[in-house]
Image (spheres, rainbow, N blue to C red):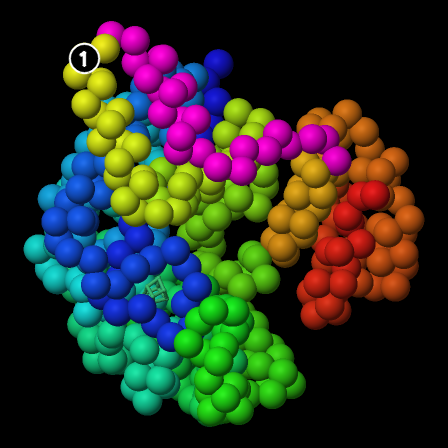
Amino acid sequence: MKRYLSLYVHIPFCAVKCKYCDFLSFDGESYATMLRYVDSLCQEIKLYKPVSEDYVVRTIFIGGGTPSLLDENLITNIMAFIKRTFKVRNDAEIIIEANPGTLRHQKLLGYKTAGINRISIGLQSADDDILKRLGRIHNYDQFVASYNAARRAGFDNINIDIMSGLPGQSIHSYVDTLSRVLDYEPEHISAYSLQIEEGTPFANNQEILEMLPPELIDRQMYDITKRLLAAKGYDRYEFSNYSKPGYECKHNMVYWTGGEYLGLGLGASSYFQGKRFNNVSCIPEYISIMEAAGEKIAETDNIEFLYNETMRKLRQNVTPIYIDSRMEEFMFLGLRMTCGVSREDFEERFKKDIFEVYAPVLNKYISEGYMAMEGDRIYLTDKGIDVSNVILADFLLD
Ligand code: SF4
């Protein structure tokens, strides 16, 4: 029987690098480099032919970076290679991340024709001063234009990303962003709190660091998000993700439930055939590995050999996943979802009852009201979510 697989496709280009961003993305790359990168990506997809027969793809996430920087024909090309190589379910969720300011009607129609059925738009804030401070390339009006263009092009599944805890952000400004977003009735809202990451321009900018709202205010923003979105019919199904019923992000659910996924493109991470690994993270190196494979593919019938040889060069940090780390991940990731983890699922995967492994920690947190158990499900309560870092760390096995 075929196994389910999800694909993550990484597009590592941005128009301008945001000042808080530590994702693997680069600004200022030439169009020629983007073209060579997309060719290389298609090459990588093609090389999976020898193993693709065992799988059926149920979700695809084209992320970055700013995938919407790419013209529709390049996205169409990538999707065509995926569909030629893998069996993709007719009802697969196929997502593209987009930045306001990079979307136009024609492009959106092209994405739709290529099979994309969900758009995730990064707004972050409706306050233009804050957007400028973050180094975003767009203002609020450009977001509105992009959102409306996506609706006009027929997208009926849209996520909007917003952020709290931003420099100079007051509760009033945050609530204003939330209300404006709610006016548009997107199917899904992701609301993350800004984390200052080492090596980003923000990390070394004292003025910015002093403008960050205190933790208590950030916590209030989180509570307001929960209340306001619940009142408007959004279900908080994960710590930071809210959806209208039936519009949960299926791709992210695969990550949180320990499903198998393959990362394609620069630096992309995979959990595939019992191993974790990530691709090389230097653009010239990635392109040269793939171009070398591309030249050989024309000369060989032995694509299986070429696949193995190329993957040895491409993949880094290949780590087999042992049972203990699989159990830890099952708990860490599963408990991020408000529905928590399934006791039966745990037993099916690990041939042990969850209490056989985790009785002391589960009994402690359940009796103290940080966790709860209802039927088959064990989950963090609201009180538990507030201190989730501490609780989740207790699920590490010695
Ligand atoms: S658009 Fe996204 S990926 Fe690109 S720099 Fe900004 S935050 Fe990072």
Establish if 364 lies above or below 281.
below
Q: Quadrant of the C terminus?
A: top right
Span colored in magenta: 301-324
Q: Residues within 10 Å of mark 1 (few under 14, many from 20)?
A: few
What residue occupies the far left of the structure in this picture? 106
Mark 1 = which residue? 299
> Viewer-proximal residue, 93 or 27?
27
Q: Residue at x 18, y 52 (%)?
A: 70
Tell which quarter ligand 1 is in.
Answer: bottom left
Q: Position of residue 157 (x, y in %)?
A: 32, 54
Q: Is residue 225 left or right of residue 176?
A: right
Please check the rendered image and state whether residue 245 is part of the magenta-colored stretch, yes or no: no
Q: Is residue 130 visible?
A: yes
Q: Quadrant of residue 41?
A: top left
> Viewer-proximal residue, 82 or 220?
82
Q: Residue at x 31, y 40 (%)?
A: 286
> Viewer-proximal residue, 391 or 184?
391
